[in-house]
Amino acid sequence: MQRDFDKPTMVKIEKVIEETPTVRTLVFSDDVLSAVLPGQFAMVWIPGVNELPMSVMVYLEKGRAAFTIRKRGVASTSLYEVKVGEYIGVRGPYGNSFAIRQGNLLLVGGGTGLVPLMRLLTFLKKNDNVTVLIGSNTKKEVFFEKMANQILANNKHQVIVTTEDGSYGTAGVVTDVMEKLIFEKKFDAVYTCGPEKMMYKVVQLASSKKIFVQASLERMMKCGIGICGSCCIKEELVCHDGTVFDGKYLLSNKEFGYTHRNKSGIIENY
Ligand SMILES: Cc1cc2nc3c(=O)[nH]c(=O)nc-3n(C[C@H](O)[C@H](O)[C@H](O)COP(=O)(O)OP(=O)(O)OC[C@H]3O[C@@H](n4cnc5c(N)ncnc54)[C@H](O)[C@@H]3O)c2cc1C
Ligand code: FES
């Protein structure tokens, strides 16, 4: 049967993985979402609650996909609490994807922003030399370090974790490590997803060294398909024209790193 991309398809949760005390991964079988491009997202319906945009997490078994959720407000907490055997609705995939370059690649992620970057890792070539920077506040909130090493097992690679409180890995923030790295080594491309202030710094740093850089943005989304306008950043719709944008465009957009719209469409500062 033909899949209707604009109506939710119900999927049964088959496995729940505790990543950290506030982050869980829900695994399900779905041929369409298991094959999405890195950067693409789905709209996830929690019956009776709400619908949320979620990056599609990679699961290293054919035909299976996942979502990795941090519990925040009512909707994300309801999704986080979905149990094995329960159903959620998914529609999509939507949005564009990262442009895959080759050579020395640097991926910089924080929190659930790591989700599209993990999928990107699975698209890289075996001869790419890959550096992954994972930023977290504290040790107990670090996740996907093992998965990044597992996906990159056949590549020349390093995974560097930073924690702001110094409880694990390098003390400090990912952008401090990135600043040092880009002066020591020549990178061919930088990819980032995470808190927008972090991405802003990443894009600035990469651009200062004239390195190709792309960032995957989050904005308030309702329709996910370019109709409602709630996800706009200036003239662009993040759900339709993004979520991935080139650094060159982002630095010319005065909203990037500074403002976003809340649920009422009112502009707020980061
Ligand atoms: C394309 C896209 C992909 C996404 N992928 C993921 C994903 O893989 N995993 C995931 O957990 N979430 C992801 N999100 C965010 C998710 O859609 C929700 O915005 C988030 O889960 C909060 O929803 P809520 O309704 O529970 O909280 P709300 O009621 O909207 O907010 C509750 C509190 O959390 C804060 N908050 C809301 N959103 C964020 C945020 N993004 N960062 C920091 N604080 C926030 C609010 O300021 C508020 O204080 C994605 C968003 C987009 C646009
Ligand atoms: S979420 Fe409706 S236009 Fe993007």
Image (tube, rainbow, N blue to C red):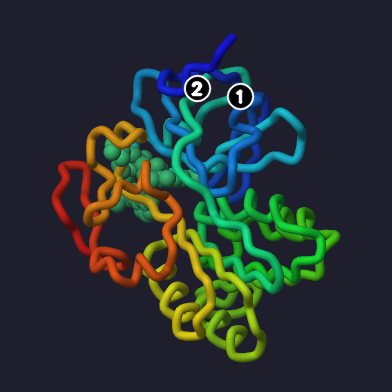
What label does residue 217 carry, if any? none
Taking the image in four quarters, ligand 2 sits in the one at top left
Tell whether label 2 touches label 1 (CB within 8 Å).
yes
**Where is mark 2, residue-wise?**
88
Q: Does 148 sit above or below residue 2?
A: below
Q: Quadrant of residue 125?
A: bottom right
Q: Quadrant of residue 51?
A: top left
Q: Position of residue 175 (x, y in %)?
A: 50, 78
Q: Residue at x 50, y 22 (%)?
A: 88
Which corner quadrant holds the N terminus?
top right
Dot 1 beta carbon under 8 Å from ligand 1: no
Question: Do we see residue 22 in this rendering?
Answer: no
Q: Amino acid at mark 1?
A: Ile
- Cα–Cα span, label 1 and label 2: 8 Å
Q: Is 34 left or right of 68, judged from the image as shown?
A: right
User: Camera-side residue: 117 or 37?
Assistant: 37
Q: Secondary structure at mark 1?
A: strand
Furthest residue in direction bottom, as rendered:
183
The answer to which of marks 1 and 2 sits earlier in the sequence is 1
User: Camera-side residue: 176 or 94?
Assistant: 94
Q: Does 22 sit above or below residue 101?
A: above
Q: Is 59 left or right of 73, judged from the image as shown?
A: right
Q: Secondary structure at mark 2?
A: strand
Mark 2 Cα shell of 10 Å, populated few (<14), some (14-19), many (≥20): some
Q: Position of residue 117 (x, y in %)?
A: 59, 55
Q: Does 199 sit above or below residue 217?
A: below
Q: Position of residue 82 (x, y in %)?
A: 52, 27
Q: Residue at x 25, y 49 (%)?
A: 232
Q: Amino acid at mark 2?
A: Ile
**Where is mark 1, residue-wise?**
13
Q: Does 234 sit above or below residue 28?
A: below
Q: Position of residue 215 (x, y in %)?
A: 46, 61
